[in-house]
Image (cartoon, rainbow, N blue to C red):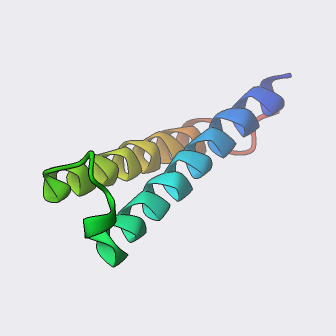
Amino acid sequence: MKYEMISALSKDCYAKIAMAKCNINAFLETPCGVGDHPNIMETIQGQIDIISQNKDRLKVLQETFDGEE
C-alpha cells in the first residue's frame, strides 16, 4: 500500500508539471487568445511556481522514499 501511495503522489506531481508546461506554451504561442488573463507575465510566473513546487515534492519523495515498499 505504501508503494501505491508514493506512486500516486509522484504521478500527481508529474501531471501538474505537464499541465503547467502546456499552459505556459499556450500563453507563449498565442497570448492574445487568453482574454481572462490580463497580466500574462504574472500568470506564467504562477505556472512556473507550480512546476517548481511539484519538482521539489518529487525530489523529497525520491530522496525520502526511493526504493521503499
- Give the percent coordinates (x, y) of residue 7: 74, 39
Where residue 30 appears, as percent x and y from the top left, is 34, 73
Where the C terminus falls, by quadrant?
A: top right
Q: Residue at x 30, y 54 (%)?
A: 48
40 to the left or right of 18: left
Q: Reply above or below: 33 against 52.
A: below
Q: Can you name the residue that lies furthest to the bottom here?
A: 29
Q: Residue at x 19, y 57 (%)?
A: 40
Q: Which quadrant of the rendered structure holds the N terminus?
A: top right
Q: Is residue 44 above or below residue 6?
A: below
Determine the image quadrant of residue 2. Answer: top right
Question: Where is residue 34 shown, x and y percent of the image?
Answer: 31, 57
Location of residue 14 with respect to 12 vertically, above or below? below
Q: Is residue 6 left or right of residue 46?
A: right
Q: Quadrant of residue 61?
A: top right
Residue positioned 21% across, 53% down in the render: 45
As rendered, which of 28 and 55 lies closer to the eye? 28
- In the displayed orientation, state which residue is furthest to the right: 1
Q: Indicate left or right for 69 with 56 as reference.
A: right
Q: Residue at x 45, y 62 (%)?
A: 21
